[in-house]
Image (cartoon, helix red, strand yellow):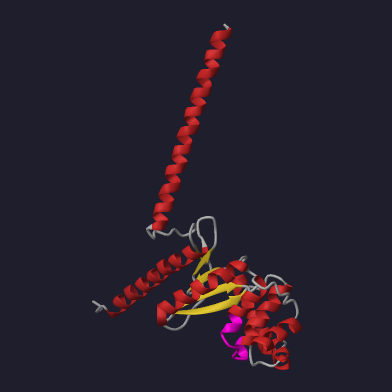
Amino acid sequence: MVRRKSFVHQQKLMVAGFLVTILALIAYLTLETVTDEGAQGDFIAGVHYVELDKPRRIRGDAIEVMEFFSYGCIFCYRFDDDLEDWATDKGGQVQLIRTPLIGSDQWRLLGAHFYAIQDLNGPVELHQGTFRAIHDLGKKLNDPEDLADFVESNSDIEKARYLIQIESAAVKSKVSLADRLSRQARITSTPQLVIQGRYRISVTQDVGSSRMLEIADHLIEKIEAERLASQTASAAPQS
């Protein structure tokens, strides 16, 4: 009797082990299928990108690519060069707009810094330089005085002029607009891309920062195809 119980127990363990193996195989094949589809460019709404409930109307021929970022985000720093090169290769097809995410008082300050150096026509080196100062050099750019010293030592912009600009109504208005845009697009982390005010691409378990640009390519092709179809339909003779 004891032997029979032991045999039955062993049989149950074997069956359970077999079922676990089958389930693992199914999970593996499912993962492989999803990965292969992504690698082939068959990106899926809700998995690789999100279609916004309330798209923002974009004017002009160039497709708007808005990056939500922060100087305080090291992933944005690592992504910045790739994004810039990608946009340059696109030429006039896309318009890249960087928009700071205002997630805290410190990020609000860094967002104001971004707009201040833009308004003062600061050299492009200040943009990457700000990333490097924070993440490579460990500088604590935690108040306008620190930022002003950094700007003055890395450009021809005088400290006093910078301090006036970062506190100006123009900069505060731009920061408020950036905050409003991020809320409309439900941006909660960085970096994220919004394509033509319609699609949001985020870094997730399925999407790394480099893959974001592949998805952006896919969505741009989709938008261009829709434009062409609309133009063809409009040009067709009416019966």
Farthest residue, direction front? 137
Q: Is residue 202 above or below residue 18?
A: below
Q: Could you say where residue 141 lies in the image, as x and y percent from the top left? A: 72, 77
Taking the magenta stretch, the answer to whether it contains residue 202 is: no
Q: Could you say where residue 167 lies in the image, as x and y percent from the top left? A: 72, 87
Q: Which residues are magenta?
A: 118-127
The answer to whether residue 116 of the structure is visible from this angle is yes
Residue at left 68%, top 87%?
A: 153
Task: Give the quarter of the figure containing the C terminus.
Answer: bottom left
Farthest residue, direction top? 1
Classify residue 231 by image quadrant.
Answer: bottom left
Residue at left 26%, top 78%?
A: 236
- Residue 109 in the figure: left or right of residue 35: right
The answer to whether residue 185 of the structure is visible from this angle is no
Q: Is residue 184 above or below residue 148?
A: above
Q: Is residue 119 above or below residue 31?
A: below
- Residue 152 in the figure: left or right of residue 4: right
Q: Could you say where residue 41 lies in the image, as x and y percent from the top left? A: 39, 60
Residue at left 31%, top 78%?
A: 234
Q: Could you say where residue 198 lies in the image, as x and y percent from the top left? A: 49, 70
Q: Nearer the viewer, residue 140 or 52?
A: 140
Classify residue 176 by image quadrant.
Answer: bottom right
Residue at left 59%, top 77%?
A: 99
